[in-house]
Image (cartoon, rainbow, N blue to C red):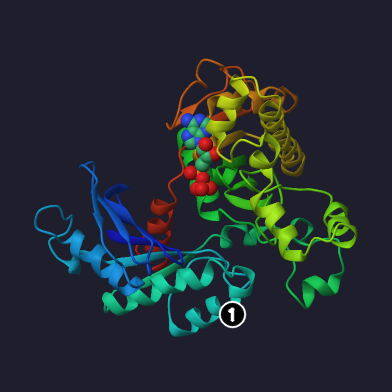
């Protein structure tokens, strides 16, 4: 099935045309600076050279029409006609408690995604722009919403209720939702396939380590706990986000140091993490370079990063009872073999031993644990677009 996958931001659209049966990417690209004077489009068919076009893209409808024009272009298109697109799968960040799985988009679903926008004010309205554009431009083609949160809706209350007050959860919806669900699901399923076992019988800890990071405990293919929560600043340390910190510090900053709520928000979301400690960059490669060049703060930032990840892995090993595999994914998890080595030093405590040589790889599926390691360690490049395409097919009843 040819499925167009759309990840729409407020001023951008990422797209991928996927042949969901084979998993092949037929074409893909990115539109940026939508609504600004100078927009830009990048498009690539298969493994062809990337084509870059600079032009104003006034809105998402226009943006999507450019995508469709490129996909059917006689010279560099990937489709004979638009009729070949059988469905559109949309990434939607927040499905709240309502959406426990992907869903066929109807006017009611659009209203409910709008209602959930208060929990993801930067994302859900932007995702809806792409949905509305697709409905308008591809008449008669089914649209499916695939939520970042829904994979985590299988968590038990002990994982999602915060020990604040019951009313805050019951009446106002303050609970752990979790994010990166599409990635965690894809990576857990690939881990099982690589190990040649059904996912239903495995306990897997997935470490999605990118600019934003989260760790998930997956039992039998279902999320039972995850490190991101109501929002996206808790859990492990990230590029610019602090991860878990003592909230007393934040209260003190507001009460005694004259910082406003929005300044504190800016601090924990944009100025902390790798950037805040290293003082160099939020990008792992820059921090590693600075550490190699002798920066003590950069070294501390790397040690802190590894420590937080390790603690979550240890905690989830206990939550799961036993662990079959720990899998690394996303920009840092897939490529950063040095930081993987640092993280894995210490995982002997849960029965995982790294094969240091095998671990020296970037961006490829590989088992990186030593042959006698009881717990397998793996690297699996994530593929959220393929997972969205597969979920879209499932929801349309075209895949079991
Ligand atoms: P996002 O959360 O924005 O999707 P990504 O998954 O793209 O983030 O991850 C970005 C992170 O991956 C950056 O910190 C970047 O430095 C890191 N990264 C990419 N390549 C490498 C590499 N070769 N070694 C170490 N880190 C890498």
In this view of the protein, can residue 19 be seen by the observer?
no
How many tags in the picture? 1
The residue that mark 1 highlights is 115
Q: Is the residue marked by circle 1 packed among few (<14), some (14-19), or many (20+) residues within 10 Å?
A: some
Q: Nearer the viewer, residue 15 or 356?
A: 15
> In the image as oriented, which residue stretches furthest toward the left?
74
- Residue 176: percent from left, percent from top: 71, 60
- Residue 389: percent from left, percent from top: 37, 58
- Residue 209: percent from left, percent from top: 58, 41
**Quadrant in which the N terminus appears:** bottom left
In the image, taking residue 81 as reference, residue 166 lies left or right, namely right
Q: Would you identify the image quadrant in which residue 154 lies?
A: bottom right
**In percent of the image, x 27 and y 66: which residue is there?**
86
Q: Nearer the viewer, residue 349 or 137?
A: 137
In this view of the protein, can residue 319 be seen by the observer?
yes
- Residue 293: percent from left, percent from top: 59, 20
Q: Secondary structure at mark 1?
A: helix
Compared to residue 65, the image places residue 368 above or below, namely above
**In percent of the image, x 38 and y 67: which residue is there?**
36
Q: Is mark 1 within 8 Å of ligand 1?
A: no
Q: Nearer the viewer, residue 22 or 310?
A: 310
> In the image as oriented, which residue stretches furthest toward the top?
357
In the image, taking residue 392 as reference, residue 112 lies left or right, namely right
Q: Would you identify the image quadrant in which residue 135 lies?
A: bottom left
**Quadrant in which the C terminus appears:** bottom left
Compared to residue 106, the image places residue 154 above or below, namely above
């Amino acid at each position: 099935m040819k499925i167009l996958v759309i990840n729409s931001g407020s001023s951008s659209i990422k797209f991928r045309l996927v042949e969901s049966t084979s998993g092949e990417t037929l074409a893909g690209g990115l539109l940026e600076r939508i609504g600004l004077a100078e927009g830009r489009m990048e498009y690539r068919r298969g493994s062809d050279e990337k084509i870059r076009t600079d032009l104003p893209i006034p809105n998402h409808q226009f943006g999507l029409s450019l995508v469709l024009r490129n996909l059917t272009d006689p010279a560099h298109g990937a489709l004979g006609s638009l009729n070949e697109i059988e469905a559109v799968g949309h990434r939607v960040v927040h499905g709240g408690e309502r959406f426990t799985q992907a869903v066929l988009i109807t006017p009611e679903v659009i209203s409910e995604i709008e209602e959930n926008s208060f929990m993801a004010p930067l994302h859900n309205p932007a995702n809806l722009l792409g949905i509305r554009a697709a409905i308008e431009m591809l008449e008669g083609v089914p649209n499916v919403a695939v939520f970042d949160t829904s994979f985590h809706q299988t968590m038990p209350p002990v994982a999602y209720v915060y020990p604040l007050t019951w009313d805050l959860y019951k009446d106002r919806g303050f609970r752990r939702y979790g994010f990166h669900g599409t990635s965690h699901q894809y990576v857990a399923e690939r881990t099982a396939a690589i190990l040649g076992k059904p996912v239903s019988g495995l306990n897997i800890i997935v470490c999605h380590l990118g600019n934003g990071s989260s760790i998930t405990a997956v039992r039998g293919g279902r999320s039972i706990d995850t490190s991101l929560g109501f929002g996206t600043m808790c859990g492990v340390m990230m590029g610019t986000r602090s991860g878990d910190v003592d909230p007393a510090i934040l209260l003190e900053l507001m009460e005694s140091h004259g910082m406003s709520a929005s300044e504190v928000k800016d601090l924990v979301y944009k100025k902390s993490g790798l950037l805040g400690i290293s003082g160099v960059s939020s990008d792992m490669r820059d921090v590693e370079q600075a550490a190699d060049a002798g920066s003590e703060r950069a070294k501390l930032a790397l040690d802190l990063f590894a420590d937080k990840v390790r603690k979550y892995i240890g905690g989830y090993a206990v939550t799961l009872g036993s662990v079959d595999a720990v899998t690394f994914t996303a920009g840092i998890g897939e490529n950063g073999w040095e930081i993987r080595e640092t993280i894995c030093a210490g995982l002997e405590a849960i029965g995982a031993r790294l094969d240091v040589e095998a671990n020296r790889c970037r961006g490829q599926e590989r088992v990186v644990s030593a042959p006698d390691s009881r717990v397998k360690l793996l690297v699996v490049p994530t593929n959220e677009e393929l997972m969205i395409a597969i979920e879209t097919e499932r929801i349309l009843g075209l895949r079991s």
